[in-house]
Image: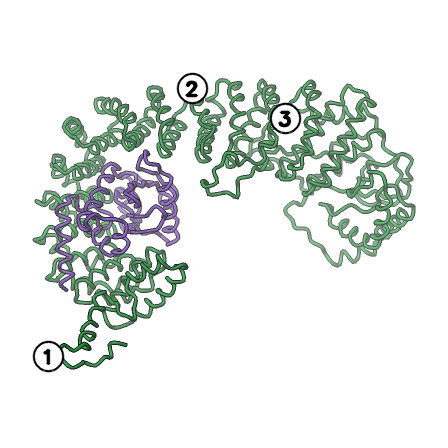
């Protein structure tokens, strides 16, 4: 992959918005992954276009190995160097048997993302009433809908718990009625 | 089957028809989307997967079913199938083939169908560009739908699959969407705008205006989306977003921390195009630092300070003080983020490492894997001569008992610092060598080669340290020889991905042996020669790679010859037999490569016939060969050595059949055959067989192969009858080793020519033959000719080159 790392200024000089691959240096969340402690995927949402599916596989494997390496009193961040040849950060947080991971660019604010994971989990909790892994396992489409309320295309659009829950309830009603 | 039940008689007020119950219950099965008695719904699939003994087979069955179901026209069935596909996606089964069917589902009027279709579509359709082309009409329809949630789903989909072509079709609707009455549509439209700008810069100008308007929208969600969008777009087209600076500045006062962070990042990235902003931004940042309670905002500010404001002393001062607090915080996350800021800070201000040195070491000792890695990076990038020793003293104890990855990282970091600028960072090499012992014993396989080459390199370059190096090497050989082969006592079997690579290649052994061979003093040799002999015959040596084996061999030989100097011949007879035994053993067990073979051949020839030579002269000669100091050669300078023109190194060896046939007729060959016959007839004392396949000149090789066939049997006989050690499998160079008194008159001299040799011209008269000549008298060599020796001497490559 031949694009060099560019500063914002360099990018401006060249104005290559369309030719430049989106993966260069944009401050966004690249992927959301939820895994259980034995490595089974419960949620996978990739916002950045990987070149091949092979890269996806590598990413997932790496994520899992990093996630299980962590012990309880460790920090929640991991820097990953392998995939995409860019450096990116993995922010992960464990809730019971599930590990929630956000893969993002290293320029993202890690602490803010950590809070964001918590908001996601709180929304899940509100909607499923004491959410557990089985809820997530048996309702894959609903989890995705919830995630879509908070993040679109790697950009966070909602940080308020109340609003998110309201919207989602309205959508669920509509779906049930149709 | 139950679908074919006829409508039964109706229930009356007096009795209910039992059959009607069954009939009514049919519909229950259709509550599960796409499910009925015949078809599995997604819950069945999941439950099945969990319960089945062989989930993969079960999944394959389900996949096949889904594939057929998805082709049904009934949208409800399609829905069920596509829902299952979602689960397959998590099981990493390929679902890209379903693209077309998903588009069909999207065209349904039901919200649930559309929603699911758009969702799964966003996973698949980006990989199938052809289908993206089909989507615009559907998208446009949905953008105008009365149902806002339809619009939401459509926008999600559009944002994930957007391509340049699609962007042109979508942009017409953007204006309408982005000013929609509902904020949920607006914020999604903003994300779509961002994506359009990123895929298609031409739309930038139009969209920039739209985005900037939304920065101060009344709804927080819209502002969040807008600030993120502006941040990314400003990286592509900063000039268009300069107008956004005032609203962004206003956003810095917002309550929502996410907005503040994004706005700050956006403003900082616009600094390049608007330098006047800098002063104002500095003030504001100081203000925020005072007022904010959110740690994430604080950290963001510090990050930006280190990145772009490192010239401002007031800001930088704040950062310096705060970082100290962060890295000592009890929360590991804060420690980690503080560490990241510190890393950037030290990059530009290396002198500050001294201040934070203690904190770094503390962090390293107490932190987890991620923190340790970060700390090591910082150390390796910023260590200088003054700080290295202290830091190393803290790190080295961590090696014992550490995990494989940890040891790898520590050793690599330390080697980085040691090697930097030709060992500039190391003040005290003696201290270094005392630590090398621990390094070697704790070395993980991946670092072995590097460590070995560093140790060897230092010893070669620094004369004063050679004594220490030899002492260390002897100690390790004596006490820890087998540890250097295969050490899994330190590797945890569950960690590390390359369990196959756990055994060592002997690079370190090679380096240590090289050191003792080259630099051991006579006294040291006297003390340890038996030890080395003993270790050279250890069966594990077979596992060593070629370079280490050669090093071992040469060390034995070198030590032997040095030991022999200033000792009379009779005193060393015992040792000579030992060395010959070692060479023997080597030939049996370890001579798997050509080079080892050649070496063995050469030295065996000398040593097994020690008595025949002028002993003192020989010893002196051999020692003189090893005397010269070998210094490392830069890789580039090796390319300056040009091979002789006569040497056709690049050319392939071609066997020309015609030439070969001619050769057969050749007189020389006939003579050779005769000679062989004579030799075998005489129960020849020495091997007359032609030499084994070597890098000989093509014709000779062919000749020997061809001519030798006829005499193979007799030669075998002679082999069997042979009793002395001389008659071993390897071939003795004729021109060199002959028992005294042998009839040489009729024997041609066939010598192997080493590929390196290009010194035909140098060949002393008559002694060294290149081609087979008829009758040549030679006398048994008494004093080996130095030139001859030096030509044939195999200059050993250092173990390093072999690696």
Q: Which quadrant: the N terminus of chain B? A: bottom left
Q: Is residue B329 left or right of B770 when viewed as pictured? A: left
Residue A97 picture quarter: top left
Chain to which the residue tagged by mark 2 belongs = B
Residue B511 is situated, as x and y percent measured from the top left of the image, at 60, 30
Q: Are marks 2 and 3 on the same chain?
A: yes
Q: Are marks 3 and 1 on the same chain?
A: yes
Whichever of labels 1 and 2 marks the residue nearer the N terminus, that label is 1
Q: Are marks 2 and 3 in contact (CB under 8 Å)?
A: no
The structure residue drawn at horizontal position 18% and vertical position 47%, both measured from the top left corner, is: A157
Colour in which chain A is shown?
purple
Q: Which residue is mark 1?
A: B12
Foreground disc of the pair 2, 3: 3
Task: Compute the Cα span from label 1 to label 2.
Answer: 97 Å
Disc on res. B390:
2
Task: Compute the Cα span from label 3 to label 1.
Answer: 103 Å
Disc on res. B478:
3
Q: How is the structure coloured here?
A: by chain
Q: Secondary structure at mark 2?
A: helix
Q: Secondary structure at mark 1?
A: loop
**Residue B400, above or below B4:** above
- Which one of the lettered chains is coloured green? B
Foreground disc of the pair 1, 2: 1
Chain to which the residue tagged by mark 3 belongs = B
Q: Are marks 1 and 2 on the same chain?
A: yes
Residue B253 is situated, as x and y percent measured from the top left of the image, at 12, 34
């Amino acid at each position: 992959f031949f694009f060099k790392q560019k500063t914002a200024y360099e990018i401006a000089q060249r104005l290559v918005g369309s030719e430049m691959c989106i993966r260069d240096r944009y401050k966004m969340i690249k992927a959301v992954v939820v895994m259980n402690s034995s490595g089974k995927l419960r949620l996978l949402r990739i916002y950045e276009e990987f070149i091949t599916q092979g890269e996806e596989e590598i990413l997932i494997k790496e994520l899992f190995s990093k996630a299980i390496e962590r012990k309880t009193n460790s920090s929640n961040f991991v820097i990953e160097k392998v995939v995409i040849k860019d450096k990116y950060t993995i922010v992960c947080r464990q809730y019971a048997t599930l590990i929630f991971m956000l893969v993002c660019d290293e320029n993202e604010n890690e602490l803010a993302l950590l809070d964001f994971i918590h908001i996601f989990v709180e929304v899940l909790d509100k909607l499923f009433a004491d959410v557990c892994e089985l809820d997530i396992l048996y309702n894959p489409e609903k989890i995705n809908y919830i995630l879509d309320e908070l993040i679109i295309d790697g950009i966070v659009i909602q940080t308020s718990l109340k609003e998110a829950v309201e919207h989602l309830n309205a959508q669920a009603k509509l779906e049930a009625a149709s | 089957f139950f679908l074919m039940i006829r409508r039964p008689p109706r229930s009356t007020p007096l009795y209910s028809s039992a059959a009607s119950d069954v009939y009514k219950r049919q519909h229950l099965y259709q509550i599960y989307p796409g499910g009925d008695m015949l078809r599995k719904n997604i819950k069945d699939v999941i439950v099945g997967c969990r319960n089945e003994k062989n989930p993969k087979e079960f999944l394959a069955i389900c996949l096949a079913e889904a594939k057929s179901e998805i082709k049904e026209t009934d949208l409800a069935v399609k829905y069920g199938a596509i829902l299952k596909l979602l689960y397959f996606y998590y099981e990493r089964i390929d679902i890209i083939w379903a693209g077309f069917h998903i588009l069909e589902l999207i065209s349904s009027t039901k919200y649930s169908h559309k929603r699911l279709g758009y969702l799964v579509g966003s996973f698949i359709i980006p990989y199938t560009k052809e289908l993206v082309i089909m989507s615009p009409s559907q998208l446009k329809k949905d953008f105008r739908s009365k149902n806002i949630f339809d619009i939401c789903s459509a926008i999600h989909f559009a944002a994930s699959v957007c391509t340049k072509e699609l962007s042109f079709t979508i942009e017409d609707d953007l204006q309408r969407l982005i000013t929609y009455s509902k904020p949920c549509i607006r914020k999604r439209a903003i994300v779509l705008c961002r994506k359009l700008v990123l895929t298609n810069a031409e739309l930038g100008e139009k969209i920039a205006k739209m985005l900037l308007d939304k920065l101060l929208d009344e709804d927080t969600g819209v502002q969040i989306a807008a600030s993120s969008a502006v941040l990314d777009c400003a990286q592509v087209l900063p000039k268009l977003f300069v107008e956004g600076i005032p609203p962004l500045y206003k956003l810095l006062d917002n309550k929502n921390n996410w907005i503040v962070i994004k706005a700050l990042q956006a403003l900082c990235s616009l600094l390049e195009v608007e330098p006047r902003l800098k002063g104002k931004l500095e003030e504001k940042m100081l203000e925020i630092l005072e007022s904010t309670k959110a740690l994430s905002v604080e950290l963001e500010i510090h990050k930006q300070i280190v990145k772009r404001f490192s010239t401002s002393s007031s800001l930088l001062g704040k950062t310096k003080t705060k970082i100290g607090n962060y890295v000592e915080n009890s929360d590991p996350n804060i420690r980690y983020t503080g560490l990241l800021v510190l890393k950037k800070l030290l990059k530009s201000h290396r002198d500050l490492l001294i201040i934070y040195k203690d904190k770094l070491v503390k962090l390293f000792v107490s932190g987890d894997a991620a923190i340790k890695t970060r700390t090591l990076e910082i150390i390796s990038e910023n260590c200088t001569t003054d700080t290295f020793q202290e830091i190393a003293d803290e790190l080295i104890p961590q090696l014992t008992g550490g995990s494989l990855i940890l040891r790898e990282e520590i050793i690599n970091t330390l080697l980085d610092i040691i090697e930097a600028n030709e060992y500039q960072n190391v003040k005290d090499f003696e201290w270094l060598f005392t630590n090398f012992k621990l390094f070697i014993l704790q070395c993980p396989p991946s670092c072995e080669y590097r460590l070995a080459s560093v140790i060897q390199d230092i010893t070669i370059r620094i004369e004063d340290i050679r004594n220490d190096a030899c002492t260390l090497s002897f100690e390790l050989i004596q006490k820890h020889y087998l540890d250097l082969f295969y050490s899994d006592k330190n590797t945890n079997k569950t960690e590390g991905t390359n369990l196959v690579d756990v055994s060592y290649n002997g690079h370190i052994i090679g380096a240590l042996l090289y050191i003792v061979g080259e630099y051991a003093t006579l006294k040291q040799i006297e003390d340890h020669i038996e030890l080395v002999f003993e270790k050279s015959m250890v069966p594990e040596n077979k596992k060593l790679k070629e370079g280490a084996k050669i090093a071992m061999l040469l060390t034995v030989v070198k030590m032997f010859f040095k030991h022999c100097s200033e000792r009379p011949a009779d005193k060393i007879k015992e040792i000579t037999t030992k060395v010959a035994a070692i060479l023997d053993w080597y030939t049996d067990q370890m001579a798997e490569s050509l080079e080892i073979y050649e070496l063995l051949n050469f030295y065996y020839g000398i040593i097994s016939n020690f008595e025949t030579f002028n002993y003192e002269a020989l010893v002196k000669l051999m020692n003189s060969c090893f005397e010269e100091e070998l210094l490392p050669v830069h890789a580039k300078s090796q390319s300056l050595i040009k091979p002789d023109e006569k040497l056709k190194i690049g050319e392939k060896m071609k066997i020309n059949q015609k030439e070969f046939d001619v050769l057969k007729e050749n007189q020389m060959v006939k003579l050779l055959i005769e000679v062989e016959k004579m030799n075998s007839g005489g129960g020849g004392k020495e091997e007359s067989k032609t030499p084994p396949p070597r890098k000989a000149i093509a014709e000779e090789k062919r000749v020997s192969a061809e001519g030798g066939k006829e005499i193979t049997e007799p030669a075998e006989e002679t082999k069997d009858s042979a009793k002395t050690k001389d008659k071993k499998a390897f071939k003795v160079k004729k021109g060199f080793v002959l028992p005294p008194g042998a009839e040489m008159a009729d024997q041609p001299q066939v010598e192997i020519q080493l590929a390196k040799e290009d010194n035909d011209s140098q060949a002393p008269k008559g002694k060294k033959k290149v081609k087979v000549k008829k009758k040549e008298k030679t006398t048994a060599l008494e004093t080996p000719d130095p030139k001859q020796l030096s030509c044939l001497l195999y200059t050993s490559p250092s173990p390093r080159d072999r690696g």
